[in-house]
Amino acid sequence: MEQILRLFYNNGSFFTFCTLQILSVYLIINHNSTQSAIAAETWSIGSGRLQSISTTVNDYLNLKEQNEVQMRENARLRRLLPNALYDLRTNVDSIIDGKYLQRYNFLPARIVNRSPYNPYNVLIINRGESLGLQAGQGVIDDQGLVGIIDNSTELFARAISILHQDARISAGLRDNTFGTLRWDGKDPRYMTLTDIPEYTNIGTKDTVFTTGYSNIFPTGQPIGIVTDAEVQPGTGSKNLKVELFNDPLRVSSVYVVQDLFKEELGILNAQ
Amino acid sequence: MRGNDAVSNVVRFILLLFLQVFLFRQISLGFGGRQQLFIFITPLFIALLPLRTPKPLVVIFSFFIGLGIDLFYDTLGVHAAAATFTGYVRQFMLLVLAPKDGYKVKASPDGKDLPQGWWLRYLGLVMVSYCLFYFSMEAFSPLFWKDIMLKTLFTSPVSWFFCVIIVTFLRPRV
C-alpha cells in the first residue's frame, strides 16, 4: 500500500497529465463537430474489426459441433434418397399413390481407431449396439464404400474394411451384369470385380455400383470406375480392375447403413 | 515587481490571455484558401512558470490557461490538451537542457539567471511541442500528418519570435 502511494506521489505529474488529457479529449469529442465525427468513424471501424475477429474465433470453436449437425442432416437426407426406400407402388395394382416405405436407415459415425495398413484392414467406429448396430451392416462415406460391420459392443463396433482380403461385396454395372468385388491386398486404390461374363461389352470409365443383393449397402451406390479388363482363360468370365472413388484408408467420418428389411429377407434366404 | 511569484504569474496569465484573444486571434495567414500560420503566445505562460513549481501544479496551471483560450476560440478542449501536454513535457525539457552544475534554487527560466541561449532553446522546445500537439488534436487523425507538419513548421518559429520580443520588452516589469 505504501509503495502504491509512493508511486502516485513520485509520478504525480504523470497522473495529473493523464487525467487532464482524458478530460480534454472528452471535451474535444463532445464540443467539436469535426473531431467528434472522426472519433465516431474510428470507433465504428475499430469495433467492426473486433467483431469480425470474434466471429471468426467463434466459428472455429463451433466447427466441431457444426460438423456433427451437418452429418446428422446428411444422414437424414440420405434416408430420403430413392435407393433407401422400398417402393410400395407396385402392390396397389393400377393406382399409383406414391407411397414409400423406409428401407435403409443412415447413422452418422466417426472412425476412432483402425489397424495399421496390412492385407486385413479393420476399423473401429464410435457407435454400437445401443444404437442398433449389428454384424452385417454396411459402412459408407460420402463418396463410396468403407466397410462392413462384423462385431459390435455396447458403444463401439468393429468393421472389416473393403480393403480386407476376406471382404466380398456384390457389385454390378448399369446394364445389370454383376459380380463380386474383392481386394487382392496390394494396391489400396484398386479393387477387382470378378465373375463378369466374358461376352459382356464393358468399356473403361464405366461406373461400378452396388447391387443391393446382399442387403448390406443400398442399391446403386457408386463405388468406382473400370480401368482395365482381364479375361480369365477357360472360365468364360473376366475380371475388371476398379478404381475406387474414395480412399477408405483416410476417411474419418462415415455413415452406417442399417437395412430395416434384413430379418424379413433373411427368412427367405434361409429357406 | 520581482520577488512575488504568485502575483506576477496571475498578472501574466490575464495579460497573455488578453493579448492572445483580442490581438493575436485576428492573425491567420496562409495560401490556397487554407490558413497555415497562427500566432500562439500562451505557451509563454507555461515556459515562464518558476522552475521550483511542483510538477503536478505546472500541469494543472497549463490546463487552465489552455481552457481559458478554448473558451474564446470555440475549440473546447483542443488548446487545453496541447497546454496540458506542454506542461507535462516541460520537466523533461528542463532535464535535457540542465546546465552542468544544475539549476539555482530560485532560478526563473528567462535570461536573468540563466544564459540567453539557454532561454531561447528552451522556449523553442516549448513552442514546437505546443504547436505539434495542438495541430494534431485539431486534425484528430494521423491521416492529416502533412497538414499538421506544415502548420507546425509555419506557426512555431513566428510564435517563438513574438514571445521573445514580448519577454524582452515586458520582462523587467511583469
Image (cartoon, grey):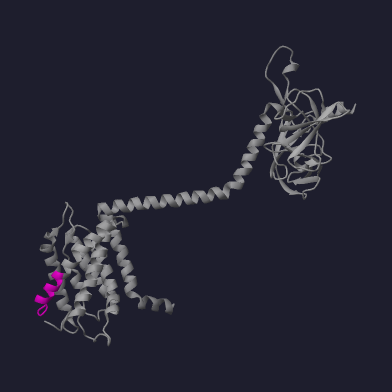
The residue most toward the front is: A233
Picture quarter with the N terminus of chain A: bottom left
- Left or right placement of residue A240 versus residue B101 in this view: right
In the rendered view, tell whether residue A173 sits above or below residue B169.
above
Q: Is residue A124 visible?
A: yes
Residue B94, quarter of the rendered image? bottom left
Residue B4, quarter of the rendered image? bottom left
In the rendered view, tell whether residue A161 sits above or below residue B99.
above
Picture quarter with the C terminus of chain A: top right
In the rendered view, tell whether residue A168 sits above or below residue B104.
above
Residue B118, quarter of the rendered image? bottom left
Q: Is residue B166 magenta?
A: yes
Residue B81 horizontal/vertical position (percent): 27, 64
The residue most toward the top is: A94
- Left or right placement of residue A134 versus residue B160 in this view: right
What secondary structure is the magenta-colored segment mainly? helix
Report the span colored magenta.
Answer: B161-174
Residue A93 horizontal/vertical position (percent): 74, 13
Q: Is residue B3 magenta?
A: no
